Amino acid sequence: MSMTITEKILAAHAGVDQVEPGQLINVKVDLALGNDITAPVAIREFEKTGVETVWDRDRVVLVPDHFVPNKDIKSAEQALLIRQFARKHNLTHYYEVGRMGIEHCLLPEQGLVGPGDLVIGADSHTCTYGGLGAFSTGVGSTDLAAAMATGETWLKVPESIKFVYYGDLPRWVGGKDLILYTIGRIGVDGALYMAMEFTGPAIEKLSMDGRFTMANMAIEAGAKNGIVPPDETTRRYVEGRAKRPYKFYQSDPDARYARVYEFDVSKLEPQVAFPHLPENARPVSEAADITIDQVVIGSCTNGRLEDLREAASVLKGHKVHPNVRLIIIPGTQEIYRQILKEGLVELFIEAGAAVSTPTCGPCLGGYMGILAKGERALATTNRNFVGRMGHPESEVYLAGPAVAAASAVLGRIAAPWEVAS
Amino acid sequence: MKYRGKAWKFGNDVDTDAIIPARYLNTSDPRELAGHCMEDADPEFVQKVRPGDIIVAGKNFGCGSSREHAPISIKEAGVSCVIARSFARIFYRNAFNIGLPIFESPEAAEAIQEGDEVAVDPERGVIKNLTRNEEYKATRVPEFMQQIIDAGGLINYVSNKLKSTRR
């Protein structure tokens, strides 16, 4: 019987020929991931199992990235706890400050995840790796603990929704705009418990970075996973990078979908999601006269090389507006090194931006750019919930890096073409 | 009736940042987390809630982050169970894994008003509104998830399984 790409990956990891939506299965995981917020709870639970060593020291990955470099004493203690655990279990993939990155930028870059993998992570944006044609999903700390002990987890096979994007993407429109537009169409629970499969000519032309951005925000529509069929673009990305063998899966032509959406994106404008839900997406031209206090360019959604190049192409030759703080956070040390080499760090500093070491920091209101009461930010991050970046009476607007850079220059939410030629 | 208390009502899409803001995630101590439960949705919630009380919410409760700190803070605040029209999937898993009882019931989420006295019989999947003398059905829990509950959470379930395979 025919299956979707998601169903095929799940079946392969459950050791069966066939799975169907709704079925509960036990699967082997290729990788289990935790960070400095979720791993401390997972470690506590892991220690209750009585298991002495983790199931595979090469496949339990710990990345302190949320509140590191340590923002306060309590955060330092949490980071210490996972550092000690990593040493005790001799984990191959523990990433210390100076070598680390935002987990979902770092793992694909380092070749730790590949097409056809099944990955769980105690972080909701673990769904990012779907950009590579992997099945990956966010779980809680206790699920991570169980996987650290056994190398397995249970999953309910999700129904799939197929999204087909037609047309050539206009200039300044990228993965972030596609996913914000999509969430705007279906709502923050529009894909609840389901798989979002992103396909069509516009996706085939989309870069890996753009694909990661789309899969990253599948959770913002309530989805279990987002996935892009792997192709030549995927192959070029993983070749020479993947640390384990990988496998390309494709949906059968007659695979079954709960729903199919077809979007013509040839005239799509850059999107902006208004407070306080990612589903409040509107074309940037409808965001007139909204002044801002802060712009953040970074995060697991848009902290990759292509994002920073896009921002730089808008910022070039301009200054950040006097009333705006522009904070730019490269996703990994490798990305940092590359933007340094390309002269982008100098360009950013010349424009009046602050450039930070990799951290999730402001995205979740941790540190490195917290908003005061009444302040407003535009960010390339993934959530604009009440209080997400600071005070419960502050506001976050979401957009892609081009809109973010243009807005930083003009001091209000702005389209890229208002600044760049 | 296993769970009984006063209903506290919340709307749709209550996210994990509202349940436990990230500014408190530099600790995983359940008591500390409980002290900030629902803070950005209702700053006085922690003062008002009494042991056994029940949270009743609309669709997509617990959307957003995977932080298990969210169900932990609700459980430690003394809330006996959560009833919602629907739950976000990671929150749903986390609640079962840590032993916070949750019930999906569009009917109950609609009809129950703030302050109503509510009781839940999990075995029968019945929610009773004692104030309005009404009864609602909750969606049946899949058998496998019931096994996790019966074991006292996922870690016990896994530990038991590991012990039996070693024997």
Image (spheres, coloured by chain):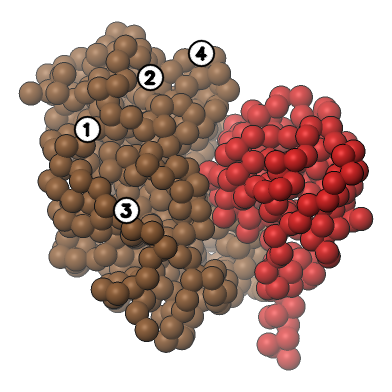
User: Circle 2 is placed at which residue position?
Assistant: A294
How far apart are labels 4 and 2 at the CA level? 12 Å
Chain letter for the red part: B
User: Circle 3 is placed at which residue position?
Assistant: A261
How far apart are labels 1 and 2 at the CA level? 23 Å
- Answer few, some or many: residues within 10 Å of disc 4's Cα (few below 14, many 20 plus, some between 14 and 19): few
- Answer few, some or many: residues within 10 Å of disc 1's Cα (few below 14, many 20 plus, some between 14 and 19): many
Residue drawn where x is 20% and y is 15% of the image: A319
Left or right: B38, with A183 as reference point? right
Q: Can see residue A269?
A: yes
User: Circle 4 is placed at which residue position?
Assistant: A374
- Quadrant of the rendered structure where residue B73 is? top right
How far apart are labels 1 and 3 at the CA level? 19 Å
Residue A256 image position (x, y, % from top left): 37, 70
Dot 2: element: strand
Residue drawn where x is 33% and y is 29% of the image: A282
User: Circle 1 is placed at which residue position?
Assistant: A269
Is residue A195 shown above or below A24?
above
Chain A takes which shade in the image?
Answer: brown
Q: Earlier in the sequence, mark 4 or mark 2?
A: 2
